[in-house]
Amino acid sequence: MEAALNYIKEKTGDFKPEIGIILGSGLGDFADNFKSVSIPYKDIPGFESSQIQGHKGQLVFTELEGKKAVIMQGRYHFYEGYSMQTVTYPIKVMKKLGIKTLIITNAAGAVSGDYIPGELMIITDHINFMGTNPLIGKNDDSLGTRFPDMSEIYNKDLIEKAVDIAEKLKINYQKGVYVGTTGPSYETPSEINMFRRWGANAVGMSTVPEAIVANYCGIKVLGISCLTNYAAGVTDVPLNHQEVIDTAEKVKESFKLLLLHFIKSL
């Protein structure tokens, strides 16, 4: 991590981000239109590269609405074969760089017909169905406590702020619970039925590990899902990743608008 921080500071100088952003599938071009310094993941000690369509794989340092931000333009995933510690390593680096707030975005499947593809869902809580936890292993006391409380992973004040902005901008949104699975296979209809009974509203293959580690590090978290498809069994339509990319493309202007106004309000 020391090597990563030194390398980043060589590229960014005295730039000190206060906000971190993780851009999910199909949302990566949000970071393309700002004056910035971009560093490919493959060049940063300890980082890995994602091979998933829609993930560019670089850290972008820029100023948004007067706030200094570091943006993960794409993420890498547990299902790519990386350990949970590797997947969440960038969060720890961002913590060391000084961020206080993290906005996590993802593409997700709607678990019921009440949540419609093309809507944004502001995450109120999550269910970890990944079978493991990113905090397993030796604890780093400089980052957080051994047994962190997870009562409010997604900050209530940030949720209220995002809701107010979405309503003022007339953006179609929902609030709900996100369930994280390992992937890479999509879930079965029976699994989706189980998640629905548990109270989940959207399902995806990311976000949960990053949110756990961010909360552990004392970072305030806002989570936003772009609902890109119905989950298995909600309709008869087979699932495919291209649908995820295509729907995210249609929704991204609303997403960008919400994101920029939210950052401005911080």
Image (spheres, grey):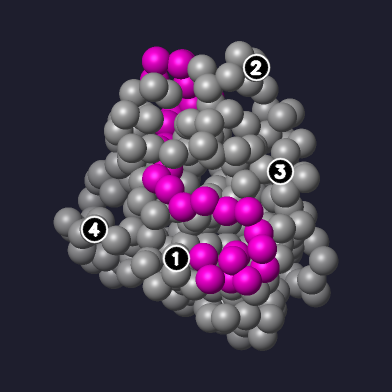
Please state which amino acid type lies under the numbered disc 2. Answer: Val
Mark 2 residue crowding within 10 angstroms, few (<14) / some (14–19) / many (20+): few
Q: Which mark is residue 159?
A: 1
Please state which amino acid type lies under the numbered disc 4. Answer: Ser
Q: Secondary structure under badge 4?
A: loop
Closer to the chain start, of discs 3 and 1, is: 1
The answer to which image quadrant residue 9 occupies is: bottom right
CA distance separating discs 3 and 1: 21 Å
Q: Secondary structure under badge 2?
A: loop
Residue nearest the viewer, comparing 210 with 227: 227
- The residue at 39%/15% (across/down) is 190
The image shows residue 217, relative to residue 74, as above or below, that is below
Report which residue position mark 2 lands on: 237
The reply, left or right, for residue 145 in relation to residue 79 is left
Report which residue position mark 3 lands on: 248
Asked if disc 2 and disc 1 are in contact, CB closer than 8 Å, the reply is: no
Q: Residue 22 location in percent, x, y?
A: 58, 56
| 182 falls in the magenta region | yes
- Mark in the foreground, 4 or 1: 1
- Mark in the foreground, 3 or 2: 2
Query: Is residue 185 something one can see in this rendering?
Result: no
The reply, left or right, for residue 176 in relation to residue 24 is left
Closer to the chain start, of discs 2 and 1, is: 1
- The residue at 62%/47% (across/down) is 119
Mark 1 residue crowding within 10 angstroms, few (<14) / some (14–19) / many (20+): some
Q: Which mark is residue 247?
A: none
Report which residue position mark 4 lands on: 151
Please state which amino acid type lies under the numbered disc 1. Answer: Ile
Closer to the chain start, of discs 3 and 4, is: 4
Q: Tell me the magenta residue range.
A: 163-191
